[in-house]
Amino acid sequence: MSLAVRVIPCLDVHDGRVVKGVNFENLRDAGDPVELGGLYDAEGADELTFLDISASVEGRATTLDVVRRTAETVFIPLTVGGGIGSVADVDTMLRAGADKVAVNTAAIHRPELIGEITRRFGNQVLVLSVDARREPDQPSGYGVTTHGGRKSAGLDALEWARRGVDLGVGEILLNSMDADGTTGGFDLEMIADVRAVVDVPLIASGGAGRAEDFPPAVAAGADAVLAATIFHWRTVSVAEVKQALAAAGYAVR
């Protein structure tokens, strides 16, 4: 039997509040992360992802208090990212209640961080967050960005995803920066291209606008689907996404 497709709401947190914009710009307040986390847990979300989107830009650690209170509210796996730059940061987040941590900018600057984390905690706790966009100059046509999509890392996204797996990450969170917040649908081509080069679980993120957008992302190779905008603004519920996946023949919890 195939594994159930995971449906994951994402809390993009800035200054202790959940926000959402388009391509990480024009951010609007979407509510309190602790309240939203509890709501999504009650609605049947399989996991929750908490990303402090300003941590890398401002060079500070993720807001520990908010993480701790969110972790106390939810009973589903919680992934925390944003400003994670060391083994000590991972230890702090796990002690605060996170089940997994996501790394992005720090791993790009110092790839050996991946091995340091997985040797200490195991690869099941480590998610490599890849914020990718179309960059014609890169061999695959996809480039990696950092700082909320504001800077190009000068890396080919497929090569970086493959290298991350070689270094030990347990999962890839693939966020299409071109599609982020647009509600125009997932970047199916990008999902398929990354799926072709990695053999770890792949989370698709960026662009979901309707419940019908989710099954094609799974067909393209995603093991889990992540969204923010449509859940926060109550356009689509977690249950409706699961219904659409089930109707398409995919196992859901």
Image (cartoon, rainbow, N blue to C red):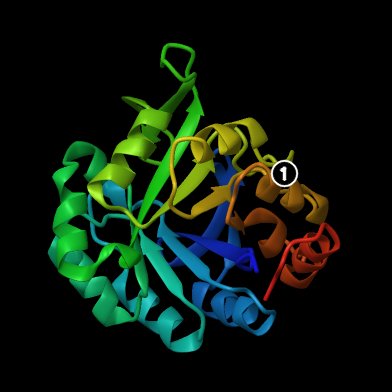
Instruction: Give residue 134's position: percent from left, percent from top.
Output: 52, 23
Q: In which quarter of the image is the C terminus?
A: bottom right
The secondary structure type at the circle numbered 1 is: loop
Q: Residue furthest front?
A: 1
Residue at the spot 41% in from the left edge and 42% down from the top edge: 130
Q: Which residue lies furthest to the right in this view?
A: 247
| Any part of residue 24 in sight | no
Foreground of the two, 77 or 56: 77
Instruction: Give residue 41's position: percent from left, percent from top.
Output: 60, 81
Q: Quadrant of residue 94?
A: bottom left
Q: Is residue 160 left or right of residue 205?
A: left
Residue at numbered disc 1: 183
Count of marks overlaid on the render: 1
For the residue marked with disc 1, what is the amino acid? Thr
Residue at the spot 24% in from the left edge and 61% down from the top edge: 61
Q: In which quarter of the image is residue 166?
A: top left
Foreground of the two, 220 or 80: 220
Instruction: Give residue 212's position: percent from left, percent from top.
Output: 82, 51
Foreground of the two, 143 or 54: 143
Q: Quadrant of the N terminus?
A: bottom right
Q: In this view, does 102 lie to the left or right of 14?
A: left
Instruction: Give residue 224's position: percent from left, percent from top.
Output: 58, 58
Above or below, comparing residue 90 to residue 83 in the picture:
below
Task: Mark 1: give few (<14), some (14-19) or many (20+) Cα within 10 Å.
Answer: some
